[in-house]
Image (tube, grey):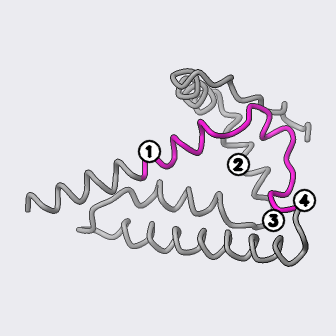
């Protein structure tokens, strides 16, 4: 039983650290200056990168679903959220901005960024691209 607790704590810690690392690494104007990640690369490299990113996102979502099952230790919902951010689907950017724009979410994210001496995120006003 003690080893299950250890696995749970390890997986939870890795999930939270990965999420915090992604938030801290974002440029401050990331949500205002949205552009394709692989746009400046050769078309073959761009397509390989896009496919790899989506496959990784789907694998992370599958892992999150597994971690959401009763009796399986880990942060399933947080892992699914990380996977959703990685995959491409219509309306993803609007969905993410709508979540980030919420005052409670933006305040906590900017507080985390401040702990690592990073400038706060700039989020477009509702209705602005």
Closer to viewer: mark 1 or mark 4: 4
Residue 82 picture location, percent across and down: 56, 57
* Residue drawn at the location 54% of the way across and 25% of the way down: 116
**Could you give the CA–CA distance between mark 4 and mark 2, rounded to whole angstroms?**
23 Å
Which secondary structure lies at badge 1? Answer: helix
Q: Earlier in the sequence, mark 1 or mark 2?
A: 1
Q: Is residue 29 in the magenta section?
A: yes
* Residue 96: mark: 2
Q: Which residue is mark 4?
A: 40
Q: Which residue is mark 3?
A: 90
- Residue 40 relative to residue 110: left or right: right
The answer to whether marks 1 and 2 mark residues whose Cβ atoms lie closer than 8 Å is no
Q: Which residues are magenta?
A: 15-39
Task: Say whether disc 1 or disc 3 marks the residue closer to the N-terminus.
Answer: 1
The CA distance from mark 3 to mark 2 is 12 Å
Q: Label 2: state its secondary structure.
A: helix
Q: Is residue 3 left or right of residue 82?
A: left
Q: Does residue 92 appear left or right of residue 115 in this picture?
A: right
How far apart are the alpha carbons under marks 4 and 3? Answer: 21 Å
Locate the N terminus and report the quarter of the image it occupies. Answer: bottom left
Q: CA distance from mark 1 to mark 3?
A: 28 Å
Task: Decide which of tag 1 and tag 4 comes sooner along the chain.
Answer: 1
- Residue at numbered disc 1: 17
Q: Nearer the viewer, residue 19 or 62?
A: 19
């Amino acid at each position: 039983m003690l080893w299950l607790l250890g696995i749970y704590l390890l997986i939870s810690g890795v999930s939270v650290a990965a999420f915090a690392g992604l938030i801290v690494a974002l440029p401050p104007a990331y949500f205002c200056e949205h552009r394709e990640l692989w746009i400046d690369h050769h078309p073959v490299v761009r397509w390989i990168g896009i496919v790899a990113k989506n496959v990784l996102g789907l694998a992370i979502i599958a892992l999150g679903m597994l971690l959401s099952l009763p009796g399986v230790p880990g942060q399933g919902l947080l892992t699914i959220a990380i996977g959703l951010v990685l995959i491409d689907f219509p309306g993803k950017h609007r969905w993410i901005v709508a979540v980030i724009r919420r005052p409670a979410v933006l305040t906590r994210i900017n507080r985390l960024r401040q702990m690592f001496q990073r400038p706060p995120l700039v989020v477009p006003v509702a209705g602005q691209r």
